[in-house]
Amino acid sequence: MDIGEIARRAGVSRSTVSYALSGKRAVSDATRRRIMMVIEELDYRPNASARALKEGRTRTIGLVIPPAGRRLTDMQLSFVASVVEAAAELDLDVLLSPSGGDHDRSFERVIGGRRVDGVVLMEIRLEDVRVGRLGQLGLPFVTIGRVMQPEDTWWVDVDYELLIYRCVHHLADLGHRHVALINRSAEWVATAYGPAHRALRGFTAAVAERGLDGADVCCGDEPAAGEACIEELLSTRPEVTGVATINEAALPGVQRGLERAGRAVPRDFSITGVVARHWAEEFRPPLTAADVPARELGARAVTLLVERIAEPEAQARNLLFAPPISLRGSTGPVLGGR
């Protein structure tokens, strides 16, 4: 049932029904009563467009995701799911839009046509042109991640710098002197992807403070890349006994690579990092890690966006998460003190 059918049964135009629902123009009491009687008779529930007419909003938010051709990691999918679920609880629809590469036109259509009331933006770079574009348009937005100078933006993020810093100190406390960071892919690092650069900064600082021998390596977001990465690391840097990582998608391959090399965890090799909890629990033995609260980040991003839509002039709000490192079975003292 749509507005056209209601108009036909009430004997009025479609625009008159719209005006009666939205209140944007005067409609006589008699006409309004006739329209409402038809609506009640048909048990009509206004769709999103009709609600938008009534409320002056689309009741739709945009979620800008990485390009559709790229396989989303489990953590990225968790962000998407949490945003959709949180929006549904508020009776909001979510319009997904890829950005980057050949998908910029989709991004522009979503933000330029006022098809949404606001936007949640994922996978933020230190200098992100999308953030600047949204700021120019004045469209409310919240980012999952943050730019280099985020003072005037609304965002939620994980403190990758602090957490990797803590992971390295944990390895050092166990006696590891030769450690490595398995980062995200070279492609992500080259685009100034925030978590990758902040993780490297935390790794570098901790290595320097503890006087360790540190190596940082890039790794693709897939098991095969993880296996190749750990094999190359063990070949070129056989003295490495401990690794910290933010690349959860590569973990199954890292585990296979260690098994093929005959390195037992944690007897011969320790692994820690910043990953989603279920990745940590599926590792064998379970991974010592700071568990990324992906679901909570996505939900909080929606909450902040709704606040920003309601109060466009409100002062920017930020949420930075630094979950504790959960000690599990993947880290241990260096065998033989080496």
Image (cartoon, rainbow, N blue to C red):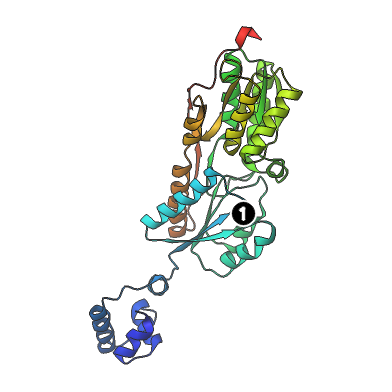
As drawn, 325 above or below 312: above
Residue where numbered disc 1 is placed: 131
* Residue 54 visible here: yes
As drawn, 199 above or below 303: above
In the rendered image, the residue lying farthest to the top is 336
The residue located at (71%, 26%) in the rendering is: 233
Residue 9 appears in which quarter of the rendering?
bottom left
- The count of marks equals 1
Check the picture and name the quadrant holding the C terminus: top right
Left or right: residue 179 versus residue 274 is right
In the rendered image, the residue lying farthest to the bottom is 11
Residue 172 appears in which quarter of the rendering?
top right
The residue located at (37%, 77%) in the rendering is: 22
Left or right: residue 17 versus residue 70 is left
As drawn, 56 above or below 179: below
Dot 1: within a 10 Å radius of its alpha carbon, few (fewer than 14), some, or many (20 or more) residues? some
Q: Nearer the viewer, residue 139 or 72?
A: 72
As drawn, 186 above or below 48: above
Check the picture and name the quadrant holding the N terminus: bottom left
- Numbered disc 1: secondary structure: helix
Q: Position of residue 36 (x, y in %)?
A: 26, 81
Q: Position of residue 253 (x, y in %)?
A: 61, 34
Q: Nearer the viewer, residue 76 or 330?
A: 330
Q: Nearer the viewer, residue 307 or 257?
A: 257
Q: Position of residue 321 (x, y in %)?
A: 49, 36
Q: Tell me the kind of residue under disc 1.
A: Val
* Residue 323 visible here: no
The residue located at (24%, 78%) in the rendering is: 40
Q: Position of residue 222 (x, y in %)?
A: 62, 41
